[in-house]
């Protein structure tokens, strides 16, 4: 049985003082959630988020991590730095990192390995652009992104891996993939995981991301291989985030 997850990706939103307000709203809102609740915040909000969520059911994640352990990498943050703060999760390979910050499948893999080796849980993002979907290469692309991201990841480490399928054309556009489109790719990702990890692939949560909101979450989450959501805009409002978390049916 895969535990459902809702993970917020705050992106570059919320100063530390604004984060404190949002976390204070989230704590009572999600306290009875039956799913795992994760908030991935900007680096500057992590201390506040970790301190405030101590003893609650909210898990804190970062939005990126560097792959080296330490050294002359001005402006970067290592996995050990996150662990030391009490951070549990980290997103790697978000399409915005790929698009604006020259992230490649190879650097996604390096970041995932660094994070896993430090004991973090990783949320690895994959997904096609509109052009790639229209060209009919979604499956090839997702296969490549998934396989390279997981290079050298052990079966044991897979217990700390979450995959997020985020079609780029659905991110921040209000245009959600249909539940059928999501299920098709989620099931495909699971076959890729099975090729490498066998039946253990059935334990890996695969989240959907891209304009996920209270109105479409129930239909998406009802699909067999959709184990939750990676939520951008709607994660910035406690009521919406809570409502999305209530979208899980009994499977
Ligand atoms: P939106 O929910 O704002 O479309 O963002 C999705 C996303 O990119 C989550 O990582």
Image (cartoon, grey):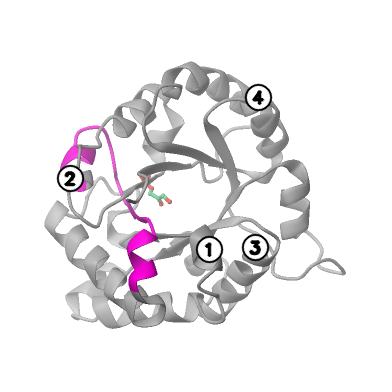
Which residue is tagged 1? 97
CA gap, disc 3 and disc 1:
16 Å
Q: Residue furthest right?
A: 71
Q: Is residue 132 left or right of residue 106?
A: left
Q: Residue at x 38, y 27 (%)?
A: 33
In this figure, what is the number of numbered marks?
A: 4
Q: Is mark 2 within 8 Å of ligand 1?
A: no
Q: CA distance from mark 1 to mark 4?
A: 28 Å
Residue in the image at 15% along x and 43% along y: 219
Assign a secondary structure to mark 4: helix
Q: Residue at x 17, y 51 (%)?
A: 223
CA–CA distance in space, label 3 to label 2: 31 Å
Instruction: Assess whether mark 1 and mark 3 are in contact (beta carbons under 8 angstroms).
Output: no
Res. 65 in view: yes
Magenta part of the chain = 199-220
- Pick whichever, 205 or 104, lies toward us: 205
Q: Residue 87 in the image: state x and y as whole percent.
A: 66, 44
Marks 1 and 2 sit apart, C-alpha to C-alpha, by 29 Å
N-terminal label among 4 and 2: 4
Q: Under tag 3, what secondary structure?
A: helix
Residue 74 lies in quadrant: bottom right
Q: Position of residue 11 (x, y in %)?
A: 52, 46
Q: Nearer the viewer, residue 75 or 117?
A: 117
Q: Which label belongs to residue 222? A: 2
- Above or below, 196 against 77 in this view is below
Residue that numbered label 4 is attached to: 52
């Amino acid at each position: 049985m895969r535990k459902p997850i809702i993970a917020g990706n705050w992106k570059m939103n919320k100063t530390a003082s604004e984060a404190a307000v949002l976390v204070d709203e989230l704590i009572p809102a999600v306290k009875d959630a039956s799913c795992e609740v994760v908030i991935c915040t900007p680096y500057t909000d992590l201390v506040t988020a970790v301190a405030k969520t101590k003893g609650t059911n909210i898990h804190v994640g970062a939005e990126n991590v560097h792959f080296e352990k330490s050294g002359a990498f001005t402006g970067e943050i290592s996995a050990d730095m996150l662990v030391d703060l009490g951070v549990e999760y980290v997103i790697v390979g978000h399409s915005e990192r790929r698009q604006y910050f020259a992230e490649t499948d190879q650097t996604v893999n390096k970041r995932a390995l660094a994070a896993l080796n430090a004991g973090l849980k990783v949320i690895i993002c994959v997904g096609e652009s509109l052009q790639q979907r229209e060209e009919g290469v979604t499956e090839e692309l997702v296969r490549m992104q998934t396989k390279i991201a997981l290079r050298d990841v052990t079966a044991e480490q897979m217990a700390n891996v979450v995959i997020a399928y985020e079609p780029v054309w659905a991110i921040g556009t209000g245009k959600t993939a249909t539940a059928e489109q999501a299920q098709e790719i989620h099931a495909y990702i699971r076959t890729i995981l099975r090729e490498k990890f066998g039946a253990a692939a059935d334990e890996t949560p695969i989240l959907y991301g891209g304009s996920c909101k209270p109105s479409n979450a129930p239909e998406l989450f009802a699909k067999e291989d959709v184990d939750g959501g990676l939520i951008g805009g709607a994660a910035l409002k406690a009521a919406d985030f809570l409502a999305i978390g209530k979208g899980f049916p009994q499977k």
